[in-house]
Amino acid sequence: MCRLSLILFGIIFFVVQPAAAQSYEFPVEHTHTLRNCRGKLLITPEKIEYKTEHRRDARIWEYVEIQQITVASPVELELTTYEDQKRMAGRDRIFKFRLLEGKITPEISALLLEKATHPLVTSVPPQSEDAPQFAIPVKHLHTFGGCSGTLKIYGDRVVFDSQTDARFWRYSDIQSFSHSERFRFEIVGYEDKVGGAKAYNFQLKEELPAQTYDYVWARVYPSKFRRDDRLAQPGNAQVTLSKRPVTEQ
């Protein structure tokens, strides 16, 4: 009986443990202005830790201590922290890591998206099996040139699907958007950059499908929809919704 219990415990331990231990460790290079150092980057549901023999660079961050997580590519991760840089007039310190082995996967992006207390900037979107409501072929305009891909609009997110410059936004992570020209679409995300938030400008290769603008508006600005103040006519129970942006001071 005792032996059977031990066998059952062992089976349960090895079956359950991998699912519970949702952690990832990579050998990385921490980039510096003059001289880089190497160590291991540990990502868990509780923290992100940089383990290195260079004690001055070793860090442990709980997610609340990270201003912004940026997955610049599958092998590049940046952490904007609240740590002051005395030599840079108190500017927040950014830790940049390059993975020497392995890659940031959609599963890791999903973990970071769940745990991050600020918007996640990622070029590796979490996986999803649902189909987008709208899909438009576009060109993402860079300072010089650009890259092509597909702008996919879902019920809970917007994704720029591209081989070279993919991006992912939850609607709560979008500060504003515009469709000021017939073949242009712009998304401004809550992404900390020198000089302000970052705008992504897309050149549409096809016209924006009907209802797309209103679909996105209702999700980016949900609190700015309000019921019409006018009284309904007798016998008419229909309620009208009107888009009236709230003017912010």
Image (spheres, rainbow, N blue to C red):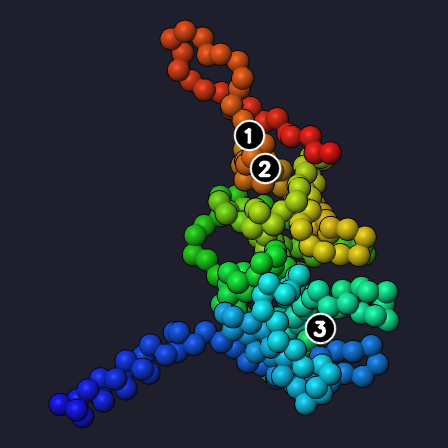
Residue at the spot 67% in from the left edge and 49% down from the top edge? 189
Horizontal side, residue 39 vs residue 110: left or right: right
- Residue 117 visible, this angle: yes
Horizontal side, residue 223 vs residue 199: left or right: left
- Residue 210 visible, this angle: no
Q: CA distance from mark 2 to mark 3?
A: 33 Å
Q: Amino acid at mark 3?
A: Lys
Residue matched to label 1: 225
Q: CA distance from mark 3 to mark 1?
A: 41 Å
Q: Residue furthest top?
A: 234
Percent across and percent down for residue 148 are: 66, 55
Determine contact: label 3, label 1, CB under 8 Å: no
Q: Nearer the viewer, residue 90 or 217?
A: 90
Residue matched to label 3: 96
> Under tag 2, what secondary structure?
loop
Residue matched to label 2: 221
Report the number of discs: 3
Q: Which badge, 3 or 1, comes first in the chain's sequence? A: 3
Q: Could you tell me which quadrant the N terminus lies in?
A: bottom left
> Under tag 1, what secondary structure?
strand
Percent across and percent down for residue 97 are: 68, 75
> Image quarter for residue 74?
bottom right
> Image quarter for residue 98?
bottom right
> Under tag 3, what secondary structure?
strand
Residue at the spot 63% in from the left edge and 59% down from the top edge? 121
Q: Which mark is residue 93?
A: none
Residue at the spot 62% in from the left edge and 37% down from the top edge? 207
Q: Amino acid at mark 1?
A: Phe
Determine contact: label 2, label 3, CB under 8 Å: no
Q: CA distance from mark 2 to mark 1?
A: 7 Å
